[in-house]
Structure formats: structure tokens, C-alpha cells
Image (cartoon, helix red, strand yellow):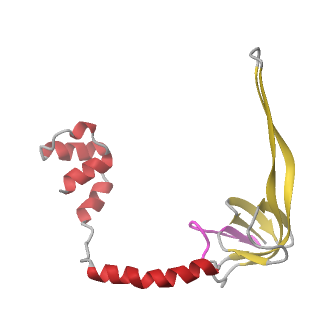
Amino acid sequence: MYAIVEMAGQQFKVAKDQKVYVHRLQEEEGKKVTFDKVLLLEDGGDVTIGAPVIEGAAVEAKIVKHLKGDKVIVFKKKRRKGYQKKNGHRQYLTEIVVEGIVAKGAKKAAPAKAKADEKPAEAPKAAEKKAEAPKKEAPKATEDLNSKTVAELRDMAKAKDITGYSSMKKAELIEALSK
């Protein structure tokens, strides 16, 4: 059983008990982390592809240690010009061990506590503002115009006698036609 999962902005093919080096994670060493952005899951020949992710699937891993990668030398040179520039860096990495792959029934990772505390306080204010403001329904004409090509929109603008339609971009054409 293996899975293709997105961890720290990169995609990795992982299997159980595999060591993976990913960009530095915020959690401490020894903690368990769950990655719920599983893009592909293979279980005994049965392949499931997400669109974009598989709902309910997750990869559970344990952070082993934080470390730095090998030194990477960046050397730039222009011939016959006397230009040479040498630079280098070491990438901050986290070593993790995949403990298991859950195909179904995984819960979404809970957001950080600081974010959770802020959102409930802001949510009632937003609800009050929405209640006070009259609801604006998006006209279906705009949706229909989005599906049209720029050439078709220009023809419609020409038929409506809109000036300057030839230099307008698609969004501008849609706005002018929806008035």
C-alpha cells in the first residue's frame, strides 16, 4: 500500500515505515502529524485518484528530528568577463517516519489553537454584517458571459454600441455588457 501525499508544499510517494525528508515543519520532535492532502492511494492493485484530494484519507507520521540538508554550492560565472559569484546554503529539513496510511474515516486536521480562538469572535460580527446588508444575487448573465470567448464578447459589445470595446480585456467586456 502506498500513497502520494502533499507535505510541506511538496508531493511525496510514501509507504508504511518509510523515512521521508520534508521541508521544516513547525511541530516538535517526537510529535505525531497527520497529512490529509492525499492525492492518490494504491491498496493491493486498487488505485484511487483524488479530485484534487481523496476525502477521508490521511497519512499519519511521526517527527523523528529536525536537521539541515547537505550544502548546495551555487556558482555563477561569465566567461571572459571576470565575473564569478560563489554562494551556497543548507536547507532546513524535518525527518519523518510514516506510521500508517488511512484509506477511509480520517478526520480533518484541527487548525491551530490561536486561529481557532480568533475565528469564533469574528464570526458573529460577520454574521451581523451579512444580516444588515441586503443580499445581492449574482446575475446569471455574468456566468453566461464568463463562458464566452473574448471575440464573442466583442461582437456583443459592438452590437450594443459600446465604445472602446476593441481594447478591453475580458473582465472589462463582461462588466460593460452586464450594465
**Vertical order, 167 against 153 (above or below):** above
The one of 173 and 53 positioned closer to us in this rendering = 173
In the image, 9: left or right of 137? right
Task: Name the residue at 60% across, 76% down.
Answer: 55
Res 139 → quadrant: bottom left
Q: Residue at x 44, y 82 (%)?
A: 123
Q: Quadrant of residue 3?
A: bottom right
Does 108 sit left or right of 74 as displayed? left
Residue 46 drawn in magenta: yes
* Span of residues in magenta: 38-56
Residue 142 colored in magenta in the image:
no
In the rendered image, residue 164, in percent from the top left (x then y), is placed at 20, 38
Q: Is residue 149 visible?
A: no
Instruction: Work out whether residue 91 or residue 18 is closer to the camera in this orientation and state it.
Output: 91
Q: How many marks?
A: 0
Please identify the quadrant where the C terminus is shown: bottom left
